Amino acid sequence: MIGKAPLDQLVKEKNIEVEWKAFELRPEGVEIPPKSPEYMERAKAGVEALSRQHNIVMKWNDKSKHSRLAHEGAKFAEEHGQANAYHDAVFAAQFQQEKDINDVSTLTSIAASIGLNSDAFLEALKAGRYRDAVERDLEEAQQIGVTAVPCFIAGNRGVLGAQSYESLLRLLEGSNE
């Protein structure tokens, strides 16, 4: 989601369709050992640098340890034609509002804010209706070697990390420059 503004521009100008896939930096059920204070300072500095580089308000947020429910919610939003709006709102919740994006009430509020039926959304999360779809995405990511987010793929080519408009255009057009 970082560097999304160039993606939005490309979508609008080239009339392309984005297919969102789930990928967990911190897999559900896996607790990552605590990091050193030095590591945490570098990570925070990295978020600040991305914020400046892409002119996007981003804050360090250590409230969200996992994102599985956010990914399941994304599948609901996609099914109801609101995938892009949902991803924008989850990005804002994570990086601008410093909310826990693996919290059911936070996600239900996000769903309602973009016009989704919050009762149906909540029911889908509680029932685990999209759990298998998220698992399939995670398996696919592992098979093709995705190791970080964002990851942009067009055809059989991909790039990791925040990208400029020009870089995404080269990816879309198949250029190797």
Image (cartoon, helix red, strand yellow):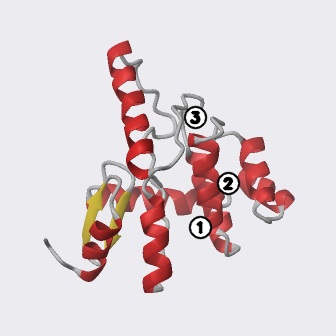
Residue neighbourhood size for the residue with mark 2, other residues' Cα within 10 Å, grouped as few (<14), some (14–19), many (≥20) = some
Residue drawn where x is 80% and y is 65% of the image: 115
Between residue 74 and residue 140, name the one nearer to us: 74
- For marks 3 and 1, give the CA distance: 20 Å
Q: Nearer the viewer, mark 3 or mark 2?
A: 3
Which secondary structure, mark 2?
A: loop
From the image, tell me which residue sits under label 2: 128
User: Can the viewer see residue 130?
Assistant: no
Q: Nearer the viewer, residue 141 or 7?
A: 7
Q: Position of residue 43 (x, y in %)?
A: 38, 29
- The answer to whether marks 3 and 1 mark residues whose Cβ atoms lie closer than 8 Å is no
Q: Disc number at residue 23? A: none
Residue type at mark 2 is Gly
Residue sitting nearer the eye, 84 or 54 = 54
| Residue 102 percent across, percent down from the top left | 63, 41
Under mark 3, the amino acid is Ser
Q: Mark 2 or mark 3, which is nearer the start of the sequence?
A: 3
Residue indicated by mark 1:
84
Q: Residues within 10 Å of mark 1 (few under 14, many from 20)?
A: some
